[in-house]
Image (cartoon, grey):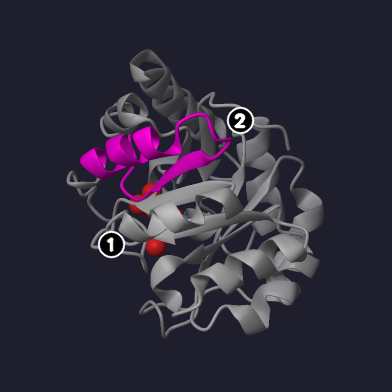
Amino acid sequence: MTFDRTIKIAPSILSADFANFGQEIQAIEAQGCDWVHVDVMDGHFVPNLTFGPPLLKAIRPHIKTVMDVHLMIAPVDPYIDAYADAGADVLTAHLEAGPHIHRTLQAIRAAGCKAGLALNPGTGLDDVAHLLDMIDLVCVMTVNPGFGGQKFIHSQIEKVRQLRAMIGDRPIHIEIDGGITPETAPLMAAAGADVLVAGSGVFKGGSVSDPAPYGDNIRAIRAAAEAAQS
Ligand code: DX5
Ligand code: ZN
């Protein structure tokens, strides 16, 4: 993975057909996505339950781009090696998941993955300053984590603007996650985000037998974001 700040579209397979992950991944990549976002939920840190390491291992060979794994679990540390072994390129843990986020980020890099730090909408940026030299990505949640299809929280625009200034020239991606559409993407691209996660916004209207709408949705989000990127 080389670093740049071009707009990257990362569809969340939380909105895919769960009976057809291989074909769904093939379809979104053929339709032009840049990364594949995998939402791991534990029914404890967030009120929903999704994918374990064996599922990730099974879908990994279908991903030709980047496997971007968002861990919404607590504790995180006992599972880092399993998700790294399953083939995660980026492994993102939540700041709120426990008292030892510094140790968690060290362990993610030690496992050979890019380290991501996710922030819930109610979490401020103060603690991030102490972690900047050990992260490759910050994921600013633009919904409360747990479910796809929720409404974008506008107060996160200012957070991304401040985070972008804090990051400066460091090679750290700003990812936004939740409620991203051609209407909300440009607000975040202008504020400094470069990786745009979209679940319902990419998968709506399409299917594995009719994947063209995935491409239309990806292009619409990308075009709106690129036109606004600062
Ligand atoms: C929310 C997840 C998101 C979510 C995005 O907990 O982290 O990745 O699936 O879905 P949409 O784009 O539908 O808000
Ligand atoms: Zn996510």
Amino acid at circle 2: Gln
The one nearer the camera, 43 or 230, is 230
Marks 1 and 2, Cα distance to the nearest angstrom? 34 Å
The correct choice, above or below, for 168 with respect to 176 in the image is: above
In the rendering, at what x and y percent does residue 198 appear? 43, 44
Residue 55: quadrant of the picture: bottom right
Q: Residues within 10 Å of mark 2 (few under 14, many from 20)?
A: some
Q: Secondary structure at mark 2?
A: loop
- Tell me if I can see residue 205 in this picture: no
Read off the residue under disc 2.
Answer: 31
Q: Earlier in the sequence, mark 1 or mark 2?
A: 2
Q: Residue at x 40, y 43 (%)?
A: 204
Residue at numbered disc 1: 123
Spot occupied by residue 88 in the image (x, y as percentages of width and height): 71, 58
Q: Which residues are magenta?
A: 157-181
Q: Amino acid at mark 1?
A: Thr
Number of residue marks? 2
**Residue 153 location, x and y as percent?**
20, 49
Task: Establish whether ligand 1 lies closer than 8 Å to the Cβ of label 2.
Answer: no
Give 103 or 35, whichever is nearer the viewer. Answer: 103
| Residue under the point 45% across and 57% down | 130
Q: Is residue 212 left or right of residue 96?
A: right
